[in-house]
Image (cartoon, helix red, strand yellow):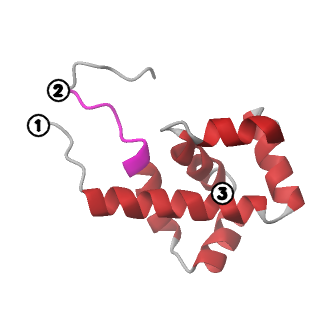
Amino acid sequence: MPIKERPAERARADDIAISALSFLAGDGERIAGFLEATGLDPSGLRTAARRPDFGAGVLAYLLSDEPLLLVFCAHAQLQPAAVQRAHDLLSPPADPDSVVRRPH
């Protein structure tokens, strides 16, 4: 059965990713760490942010750093599980029924 996406859940996941990027951008050290980890530079950040997978990447970055994740969650008044769900929705596992396969 194909993966079904609910528009409200997708919008909420996008909102969490945008909030996460704003959180990172609000602190010089945080955004520098993100840029270093992603290989982006400040001028490339705006272009990269337009990519459909960018939000999932921002959330993956937070999920890879538990102390940073917890600070973000306190800031955004979210549970870490909400960030994980948002990441999973923005970057779901491969749908076995899909004609297009994601690279692993």
Q: Position of residue 33 (x, y in %)?
A: 82, 48
Where does label 2 land, which residue? Answer: 97
Res. 24 image quadrant: bottom right
Please state if 60 lies on the left or on the right of 38 as rendered.
Answer: left
Q: Position of residue 14 (x, y in %)?
A: 46, 56
User: Which region is colored magenta?
Assistant: 89-96
Please state if 7 lies on the left or on the right of 70 as rendered.
Answer: left
- Residue 31 vertical position relative to residue 16 in the rendered view, above or below: above
Please state if 43 lies on the left or on the right of 71 as rendered.
Answer: right
Q: Is there any visible trace of residue 66 in the rendered image?
A: no
User: Could you tell me which secondary element the residue under label 3 belongs to?
Assistant: helix
Q: Position of residue 11 (x, y in %)?
A: 38, 60
Where does label 3 land, which residue? Answer: 21
User: Could you tell me which secondary element the residue under label 2 belongs to?
Assistant: loop
Predominant secondary structure, magenta span? loop
Where does label 1 land, which residue? Answer: 1
**Which residue: 76% across, 59% down?**
25
Identify the mark nearer the N-term, 2 or 1: 1
Instruction: Report the front residue among 7 and 101.
Output: 7
